[in-house]
Image (cartoon, grey):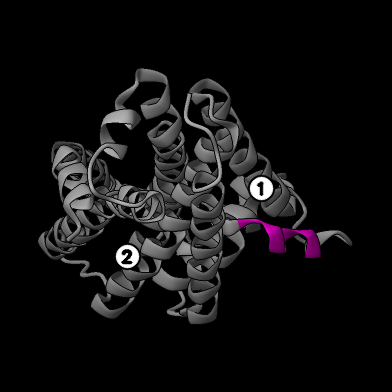
Amino acid sequence: MFEVARYEGERRLVLGATIAVAASFYGAMFVALSPSFTDFDLEAIFSNLPQQFTEGLGLAAIDTLPGLLAVELFQVGWVLVLGLYLAYSAASMVAGDIETGRMDTLLSAPVSRSKLVVEEFSSLLVPILAVNVITPIVLYAGSVIIDTPLDVANLLALHALAVPYLLCCSAVGFAASVFLSDQGRAQITSIGVLVVAFLVETLLIGTDYEVLGVIAPMNYFDPTEILVNGNYDLAGGAILLAAAAVLVFASQWRFTRMDIQ
């Protein structure tokens, strides 16, 4: 049982550890720098910026440690960089295995195509869980050291809700990998879809077209609301999980009916 998931997960252990260490170091840097941000006159700095920019990135609370981390670490690191990276990585899984001929070897094993797809995707939980387990420990320890402890409940909620978001981003890339069957096109498409979704969500805030943001995964994961205001969008997390499941099941359906060449 789960031989493919275990094998693929073990291959991603180093990747998960690397991402977790990099994210922890990046976050610790902002924890150390946070005392200097209290000297900024935010109202003057952001007065000339568009409302969509300040609201979309949650810049209003950047003079506090939770606000700084929400913007610099999570809005940039999680919502953009990590989400795009996981989508890019997932986009190479099926298409890449087909191009290298590795898929023929996998399919020669006593495992169905439908099960293979689910287990390959589930291996992405290794880096996702690694970064969301290790990073909050480092952030909280750093906040205690500078005598500005983060709210534990908010911090844990943020990393728990980050898992559905990152799974959804990964599912976008995974679906592209199956439906396009060309690694390069799948990677470009997955990145393009998420970048466009981010721009739609960010630039349309406060406009008559704000409702279009419902198509963006970023609409359901707001680090500032969680870490600064303590508002947990559990329904949004459920929507992200449902979207990821739909994309994986669609990929499963497609893969069981496609020719492997």
Viewer-proximal residue among 192 and 26: 192
Where is residue 228? Give x, y as percent. Answer: 43, 71
Q: Which residue is mark 1?
A: 197
Q: Residue furthest right?
A: 208
Query: What secondary structure is the magenta-colored segment mainly?
Result: helix
Left or right position of 225 against 219: left
Q: Amino acid at mark 1?
A: Ala
- The picture quadrant where one finds residue 25 is top left
Where is residue 191? Give x, y as percent. Answer: 56, 34
Left or right position of 203 against 159: right
Quadrant containing the N terminus is bottom left
Element type at mark 1: helix
Q: Which residue is mark 2?
A: 159
Left or right position of 247 against 120: right
Residue at 48% over, 51% down: 171
Range drawn in magenta: 211-216
Viewer-proximal residue among 159 and 34: 159
Where is residue 194? Give x, y as percent. Answer: 59, 43
Residue 140: numbered disc:
none
Q: Is residue 92 above or below residue 221?
A: above
Viewer-proximal residue among 64 and 16: 16
